[in-house]
Structures are given as structure tokens and as C-alpha cells.
Image (cartoon, coloured by chain):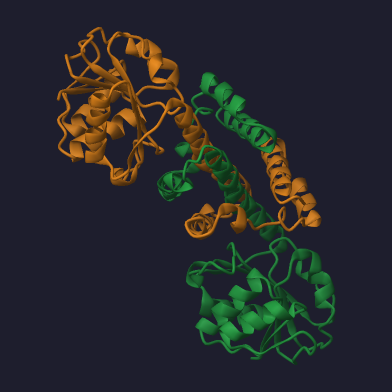
Chain colours: A green, B orange
Amino acid sequence: MQIVIIGSGNVAYHMAKAFRLKKIPLLQIFGRNGEELKKISEELDVPYSTEHLEDADLYIICVSDNSVENVSKIITKKDVLVAHTSGSLPKEILAGEYRKSSFYPLQTFSKSKELEYEKIPFFIETETEEDKQLLFDLASQISENVMESSHEKRKYIHLTAVFACNFVNHLFARAKEVSDSQDIPFDYFLPLIDETVKKIHEIEPKAAQTGPAVRNDVRVLELHEQLLKDESLAIYKTMNHSIQKMYEL
Amino acid sequence: MQIVIIGSGNVAYHMAKAFRLKKIPLLQIFGRNGEELKKISEELDVPYSTEHLEDADLYIICVSDNSVENVSKIITKKDVLVAHTSGSLPKEILAGEYRKSSFYPLQTFSKSKELEYEKIPFFIETETEEDKQLLFDLASQISENVMESSHEKRKYIHLTAVFACNFVNHLFARAKEVSDSQDIPFDYFLPLIDETVKKIHEIEPKAAQTGPAVRNDVRVLELHEQLLKDESLAIYKTMNHSIQKMYEL
């Protein structure tokens, strides 16, 4: 099977790297950003192009959601399988006469951060049983955790991931603003952060809640509000309100 | 040195346990909740009382912020050192004629979750050099990471911890509501969550941000808002607004 990856961002890079590590042949990485493609091409020893899309059996589109539809139009062959890697788009967004599918890896990808690909859950949706088998076989070479998922379910998986990953990271960024403002090294907080996450491997997050809001410690809540402003203050109030609603305080 | 721990909650339990593990003698755990004290006493083999407070050299008050002042009044001896474990209270909240101090462990404590005490940063504030040395020596038997901290700085340490731990845990709880609503096992998200945290050991959180808000993917943001309501919707909007402000989108 000949495979082409389309895109040069974080997902394209890690997808290509996972394939190379598992000795799955890649015919090409294709995209608009020649500079990024060249870097990936050199690191992973995969041919790249910004102009000529190779004839393949499977195209995996790894571009931002906004671009998937447009990018999908450059594939003009009919007897091929095309997959996108978006958590929120239906496979029908792919605008060609080929077989359509979704190949969604549930992970946060940054080029500079190595990953254990074996642990990444892959969610697959296809038009036919045959394609399902094909993508299952492919994903199973990368990951131990491959599942089928409808578009409806995938939307909620992606939404859950936004809370559990994107928003969590943003809280770390806002937390670091607070500690930076007092020259407190953010490293001090890493054992606490590690423990916060270790805990939910053993205890339900709802049962693991600690802090002033769940204790309804009004004095501390008021003190903290005085130390904050703007977006951080808005987050502080919104989160505390949500905690107090969840525990009916 | 004779030490008494006052309180029967998560902090009191783990403080007592850390002392026992390091063979630091504990004279007594004292508090109001006889049932909880009895459990701790039996597990850790430490005497407890709800009525008679033993004469000690050091009292460590491990109760909720709201109760520290009142509880501190039960210590009537003068030539003793008293410490509270609150992140946000000044040592002057302690209402007696004894020497006052703060002994703040930066961690999230749940009775049912074991901890590596060596990694917990301890922040200490005292009235005298002698007491500082005493609490440093004590904390250093438990942890590799003991520092001095003024009340002013400690307030910000605690506030940072609320963002990086309490709010992060609440995001996990709200995320789990979303996945539970579609019968998606929350375990699917653990590799993603683990990676989110591993990442910030290597990359600044601001540089590690991914997701629809930082990509300004308006279509996904609108789709997600339709899937949410009430507190979760409020969190979604507040967090996205804050992300977009941080990256000037």
C-alpha cells in the first residue's frame, strides 16, 4: 500500500515519524510549506513535494480543520482512500469522489516533544468494511489502542480532550504568569501537577477535588480575587462557580 | 522535641504519616473528630485525643483555613512553637502568646492516595532564626525541597497551586461529564492527560498550547458551544477567551 501524508504541522510530523519508526513505507509528504516539509523530510528520510502529489492508495490529510475541505480537493483520483485526522469534522467534509474516512489520533502533538505512539488511541470511521480493516491494520501497527467511532461520538471525544488537555495546559500558562509575577520558579509546582494527574488514575476526579472552592472557604476566595485581574480573574470566578455548583455548595 | 499534630483531615493524616515513615516521634494527634482520629491513630500507631491536649514543644495545626484561628486558641502554653499549614494565612492569625510560624506543604492531599513525601516543597516562615532552623531540620527529614517564604509570597504560591491543581482537577471532572454523557470511557483520555503534563516538564506551557482556540478555529468553537450548557459552557467560553487574549488572536 502506497501512503502519502498531506500537511507539515505537528500532526503531519508525528504521523510521519510514527510510520517511519514502525517501518511503514511512506511514498511522500506533501504540502504548501516547503521549509517545514524539507525539515521533516530530512529528519525522517521521506520524499516531499509542494507541487506534485504522488499517486497513492491512501492519503492522510493532517491539516487544520479549516483547511481540510480545500486540501481534500487536490486529490482527483477516484479509486483511493482518503482520511482526515480531525476530531470534529465528518468524513463527508472530504470533497472528492474517492472513499472517505476519518483517522483520529487522540493526543496533543508538538514537534519538539517525543511521544510514545503505542499509547495513542486511534478512532476510525470508514464507508466500507474493507477500508475499516485496512485502517485498523495500519493504526494497529502504531498503537495498541484502535477503535471505531462515529462522527457523533468523535465530536464528544474531541470536546472532552479540549477540557482535559487544551484548557488544562492554558491553566498551567496562567498559573505560570502568577508565579512569574513573584519570581517563584514554576518548577516548584511540578510535583503538585504530577500528583494532580496521578491521582485521577486512581480516584474519580470529582472525588479528588481539593482547594478553597470545594471547602467553601470564602475568605481565601475573596483574598485570591484581590490578587488577580482580567482573564485570570474571569477564570478564577468561573471555575469556582462551577466547582460550587458541582458540589451544591 | 515533642510534636503534636492538630486536625484529622487530609493534611493532618499525611503529615502524621510522613513523620511516622521518617521515624520522627509524634506525641499525639488531637482534634474534634474522634472517629477520624481513631482511624489515623490505628493506622499510624500514634496516640490521639479529642479532649486532652498534650504538653509539647511544637504544635502543627492542620485544619481548614476558617478554623485555624479558633483552633490556635486551645494552645495556652507560652514557651512553645506553633505552626499552621495554610497557604494563604499569615502566621499572625495564630491567637496565642507562643512563637508563631507557618509550615506549608505544597501538595494536594487525599487520604486514599499515597504520596512521595520527599518531593513535596515545604515553605517555612518563623519569628526567629532558631525556630527557622528547627522547622528546616524537621521538614528536611521529610522532603528534599525546603524553603523559606514570606506570607506575601506564600499567598501567590497558593494561588498558583489553585490554578495548576484544583482547577485542573475540576476540568478533569467536567471533561468526564462530557465523556460519560456519551458512554466514552474516561480511561481513553489518560494518555492524553499524561502527555499534557509531561510536555510542560520540557516546554513552557505558553509554547505548548494546542487546540481550536489557539488555532482560532471558529467553526469548531461554535460546534463545541452547541454541545455544552450551563457551567461547562461558561468554562468553555471563559477559557477560549483567555487563550485568545494570551495569543492576541
Q: Position of residue A223 (x, y in %)?
A: 56, 23
The structure residue drawn at horizontal position 48% and vertical position 70%, both measured from the top left corner, is A116
- At x 51%, y 28%, the residue is A214
How far across and down, in percent of the image, does residue B158 sit?
47, 33
Please tell me whether residue B30 is drawn above or below residue B141 in the rendered image.
above
Quadrant (top left/top right/bottom left/bottom right) for the N terminus of chain B: top left
User: What residue do we see at 58% from left, 63% from top?
Assistant: A107
| Residue B153 in the image: above or below residue A51 | above
Q: How many marks?
A: 0
Is residue A27 in view?
A: yes
Left or right of residue A103: residue B121: left
Q: Quadrant of residue A224?
A: top right
Which residue in the rendered view is the most extreme toward the front? B129
Residue A134: x percent and y percent?
A: 62, 82
The answer to whether A225 is drawn above or below residue B225 in the figure is above
Establish if A146 lies above or below B140. Answer: below
Q: Residue at x 73, y 71 (%)?
A: A63
Place residue B78 in its image quadrant: top left
Q: Position of residue A75 (x, y in %)?
A: 81, 83
The answer to whether residue A92 is seen in the rendering is no
On screen, residue A69 versus residue A225, left or right, reads right
